[in-house]
Image (tube, rainbow, N blue to C red):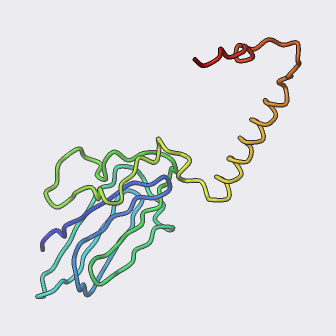
Amino acid sequence: MLPALTKWYDRRDFVCVEFCVADTKDVKVNFDKTKLGFSCVGPDNDKFENKIDLYLDIDENDSKHKRTDRSVLCFLRKAEVGITWPRLTKEKTKLCWLSVDFNNWKAWDDDSDEELTNFDQLSNMMDNMRRADDANDDYTDDEDTFDSDDDEMPDLE
């Protein structure tokens, strides 16, 4: 049995793992609290198997997988939401078949606005505009108040 080439990325609520085997048959995915198991038969009847001891616990009942023509995607629901996974595996070892999916990776822990819905973003923007208007209402424009741009401009020569 060969290990399938695997890519993964981290999100706030879940970790996505993609086993890159096209035209799979007999796909088996096992979600355990601390482990992920995968096996399938690929083209040319090659047999693939991956066993991964996970970095942190997952909710095995709420984790799912989806088979496509090009790969098998697994969505692992984190047991503790909001914790960054610096790696997929429990052990800090380099596995030749495992890599980060940089096309889907994003630093979600630094950018909380991106997770907001459009409605939330619009609501925040309107609140900020209202606060700016309230700050302008506090400003009084009396004629007796001297401002540096109230000086007369010299004539042009």
Whether residue 149 sits left or right of residue 142 in the image: it is left
Q: At x 54% / y 46%, what residue is drawn?
A: 112
The picture quadrant where one finds residue 102 is bottom left
Q: At x 38% / y 47%, what residue is drawn?
A: 85
Which residue is most to the front? 157
x then y, percent, for residue 135: 79, 29
Front residue of this view, candidates 131 and 33: 131
Whether residue 141 sits left or right of residue 24 in the image: it is right
27 w.r.t. 137: above or below: below
In the picture, the quarter occupied by the N terminus is: bottom left
In the picture, the quarter occupied by the C terminus is: top right
x then y, percent, for residue 66: 39, 78
Whether residue 120 sits left or right of residue 54 in the image: it is right
The picture quadrant where one finds residue 122 is bottom right
x then y, percent, for residue 24: 24, 84
The picture quadrant where one finds residue 38 is bottom left
Q: At x 62% / y 59%, what residue is drawn?
A: 118
Front residue of this view, candidates 145 and 55: 145
x then y, percent, for residue 81: 52, 51
Front residue of this view, candidates 20 and 103: 103
91 w.r.t. 137: above or below: below
5 w.r.t. 147: above or below: below
Whether residue 126 sits left or right of residue 16 in the image: it is right
Q: At x 78% / y 41%, what residue is drawn?
A: 130
22 w.r.t. 75: above or below: below
